[in-house]
Amino acid sequence: MDLRFGATAPATEQERAAIASVLGPPDTGWDGGKRTTADGYAAFGGHAARARRHLLIPALHALQDRVGWISPGALDHVCERLTVAPAEAYGVASFYALFRTTPSPGAVVHVCDDLACQAGGAQELCEQMRRRFGAEGTQAAFNGAGLTWQRSPCLGQCDRGTAALIQHAGTEPSRLGLAPADPDRIWQALQAGTPAGAAGPPLVPQLEDRSSRTLRLLRRVGQVDPASLGSYRAAGGYQMLRRAVALGPQGVLREVRDAKLLGRGGAAFPTAVKWEAVAANPVRPHYVVCNADESEPGTFKDRVLMEQDPYALVEAITIMGYACGADQGYIYIRGEYPLAEARLRNAVGQARARGFLGGDVMGAGFGFDIDVRRGAGAYIAGEETALINSIEGKRAEPRNKPPFPAQSGLFGKPTAINNVETLLSVLEVLRIGGPAFAAIGTEHSTGTRLFCLSGSVRRPGLYEHEFGVTLREVIEAAGGVTGGRPLRAVLLGGAAGSFVGPGALDTPLTFEAMRAIGATLGSGVVLVLDDRADITALLRRITQFFRDESCGQCVPCRVGTVRQEEVLARMARGAPLGSVAAELALLDDIGWVTRDASICGLGQTAVTAVQSAVRLGLIGNGPDRDQGELT
């Protein structure tokens, strides 16, 4: 691609219309409009145009939704409109997996072959797709179906076995998450043009039995209409915002502090500390962000909450904004969640129309509004500073810390960031009070936790338990191991988590207990593996995942994830360099370097699953360890 203004064919009228749907019509020839005589004497835009840089990714989404790909001419026009260098804009467009910068059919199907789906038959599905629609790849020749397909990392539908995401470009674009998926269902969905709103009921098995009475974060799932603000209010919605206003910002912060609420995104950072740092910062304005870029393989809890209880998230982030002194919030949702995005946008619109968002929320004398931003397929965007960069219209590359977001975050201003589960926990804190919330669970892990059960369990799905429940109890609540087969291992926390063996079944699931055994709760993944599981294949998929998802910014992660994948590939082929023992020693060295020297959590945790598998003897523990056999 020739990255210069005017070096390619101009954007088509269709492409210009798509861009204008986000940026509005151009005002002058300087920002892509028709040249006039006045343009020869004065240039307008400058700072005003660059201040809209954050609209780059929404504009690229609009282009791809309308045309199916981002052409050089269309990218050139976007650059003119936003005063962005073409090379920089191309760097953004080519960074995200869901954007395509080469000609592509109007329909693209992404088929998940990640951890949970692999256990559910993803390889068989991919083979069926190959036979039905031809070879994988966006550059594939036409197959008579007018679509192409490609393998995809986790799509967040792990509770349903196999999964696919359909992108269909056109004047009425559609995106659809389909699970369970097979070629016939995919073809029928494409023919019917199924809208994003079509989906089956969520798999929350506890709703089917008496244990639903103890649910807190999930108590409205299946009980309210996710499209109706009235239904949410009838179930107690917005009472917590009224209580927050009655308490005042400091009162809200006090309740969150008393609750000892830790973040549920994996780092377990105290929520009150983060909010108080932003609220006390004299620099204005303040921003609050909900990290809904739930991309950890095996995780689907936030998707269920957003699809089934979207108004709760809108209310919770409004309370967050009120407590932190922010008048603008952002919900950054992963691009693979079309239904959740549609329901959130509807919830934000209805809340704004009814006075729960806007210049004077509920007549309480404070203003707050929400902008929903769609991600474009980047696991690294789940890291808070990478997410900030993405909202600003940049590549989702992590920033050096300090400064932390509470000091200099979105647009260089104080910013508080929490994920969906954490924010819904704040509603529960206000509902029962901080001290009462702290009395649930254990001293250092308070409240309840959502667990994503998948793999070899009888009843996969989303479960809510108080902290302190044991791993055995969680698996038994899901019906136990499928077919009563022996348990081989459990992957806790997703690809960035750790394998634990049957000896850990009676370990309490708390932050402190997990640290004590060298594991992590992470994002709440509990992937159960029986004696038939192909651990080597799972580990290879994990290493390939991190190799592909590394942003490449720092050498330890960029090189280390590749070297890790190469070692596993050699061992799987039975062709180690030297011996298996030597390869395992190399893996250990790679682990120390990436963990100690990577700029962010991706590199620091990319080796965790492999190292835990080695410790458990799941790999590299065969009779020919010193020669070259992988077990």
Image: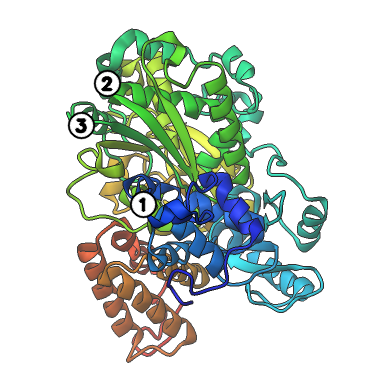
* Location of residue 528 in the rendering, given as x and y in whole percent from the top left corner: 52, 54
* Location of residue 590 in the rendering, given as x and y in whole percent from the top left corner: 27, 73
First in sequence: mark 3 vs mark 1: 1
- Check contact, mark 3 vs mark 1: CB within 8 A: no
Residue with the mark numbered 1? 42
Direction from residue 24 to residue 339 in the image, left or right: right
Q: Residue at x 54, y 34 (%)?
A: 305
Residue with the mark numbered 3? 277
Direction from residue 300 to residue 438 in the image, left or right: left
Q: In whole angstroms, how far apart are the C-alphas of marks 3 and 1? A: 44 Å
Mark nearest the camera among 2 and 1 is: 1
For label 3, the crowd category at 10 Å Cα-Cα, with few meaning under 14, some 14 to 19 and many 20 or more, is some
Q: Is residue 139 above or below residue 425?
A: below
Residue with the mark numbered 2? 253
Q: Residue at x 37, y 40 (%)?
A: 508
* Location of residue 2 in the rendering, given as x and y in whole percent from the top left corner: 46, 77
